[in-house]
Amino acid sequence: MWILWLFGGWLFIQSVVALWERIRGEWRLRAELSKLRREREEETVVVGVWLKELETGKHELADHRAAFAKLIAERTAGFPWLARAFGDYVQLRALEKADALDSKQRPAPRAAEQIRETAAELRAAESRARLHGYQLQYYESLFPWLTEFRELSDEDADSLATVLAPSSGEQPEEDPARHWLSDGEYASLTTAEKYQRALDRYQESRKTNWQVGRDYERFVGYLFEREGFRVDYRGALFGLADMGRDLIAARRNEIRIVQCKRWATAKTIHEKHVFQLFGSALEYQLRLEDSQQPFLDDILRQAPEVIPVLYTSTSVSPMARRVADRLRVQIVESFHPQPYPCIKCNVSRRSGERIYHLPFDLQYDRVVIEPERGEVFEMTVAGAEAAGFRRAYRWNAD
């Protein structure tokens, strides 16, 4: 009988110990939350003091700038503070699991000890991950075009890598049109037939999101070229590293900084995208005032007016539209591409030869069509050849 009493007493003691550890864990958690609350209140007080000083206008401009810098430092310090809070929470949860392993009916002290050893590592890892996440969100709020990197597929990444890879200066080993033709077709068809078939297959092929966006930019660029603008295709040549300037269109004393967003209809253009485009255009104009851009030297005759323009296949939020009106940002929404003459026919400045380039040629986006020199866009290969143009032998800009 006394053995049963001893066993019951042992169970009672174990229950009390487990309850005590749980109470201790709750106390520790409450203490941490109380500490975090106090720190948050202190930060709020600091912000309130700064706002009060700013409103009273007691300080000169230099003092205000110093106060603003102090506020920024304190607010950015909130990133690590909040990251540490999440890290502490993860560590406490891990310690709770370790305590549960120690206090269960069949204790697992070795597993509990392993969890305690890794709890600190989990805390540090969680803090770092949260901090990096906050920093990324902050950067994306400043530069909204960075969010497009989040949606890159593997195929998009491969396409971008091809575009951004440094050029070795060597010519491609074979005609890019061969990718779209069988060996028999390439050998037996006439030049007009085989290149038209390659172009048709290229246009009908499934494209990555980045390629779809690039083709959208090309269509918008063509419309500007048709109106007499000289177009620099930044997005097609530099991928997502174009600072949101997909096209730079110049004509006489005006420049358009064009951003193209061919998005799904479920997505919406918000005011942050308008702010970013406006800032990019403003920065471009300031740099233009300091030093003339090379490709504009023979176009501009006086100080140009730089106007930001946004083309999108989706809609714009009401606030974004109000912001655009106030900042004089032109928006063309619900705009979709149409079939257009995409074959570029140019005249070589070196030899005077008449050459046409297809959209899959490596230097296609660098070729500039100058109608005054007899250069044109053609819809079909047959039309280009009938006008006296031949395919570029090296598939490069002559």
Image: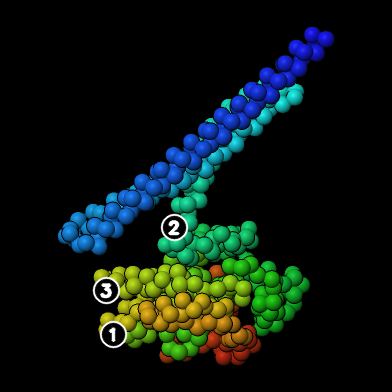
Q: What residue type is labelled 1?
A: Arg
The CA distance from mark 3 to mark 2 is 27 Å
Which residue is the site of mark 2?
A: 139
Which residue is more in the foreground, 349 or 53? Answer: 53
Tell me if label 2 and label 1 are in contact, CB under 8 Å: no
Mark 2 secondary-structure assignment: helix
Residue at horizontal 25 percent and vertical 54 percent from the top: 67
Q: What residue type is labelled 2?
A: Tyr
N-term mark: 2 or 1: 2
Q: In this view, does 267 lie above or below 52?
A: below
Please identify, in this view, whether the residue under mark 2 or under mark 1 is nearer the observer.
2
**Image colouring:** rainbow
Which residue is the site of mark 3?
A: 289
Mark 3 secondary-structure assignment: helix
Q: Where is residue 80 in the image (x, y as percent from the top left)?
A: 43, 44
Please identify, in this view, whether the residue under mark 1 or under mark 3 is nearer the observer.
3
Please identify, in this view, whether the residue under mark 3 or under mark 2 is nearer the observer.
2
Neighbours of disc 2 within 10 Å: few (<14), some (14-19), many (20+): few
Which residue is the site of mark 1?
A: 301
Neighbours of disc 3 within 10 Å: few (<14), some (14-19), many (20+): few
Quarter placement of the N terminus: top right
Q: Can residue 337 be seen in this view?
A: yes
Q: In this view, does 29 lie above or below 313?
A: above
Q: Is residue 2 left or right of residue 356?
A: right
Residue at horizontal 47 percent and vertical 60 percent from the top: 140
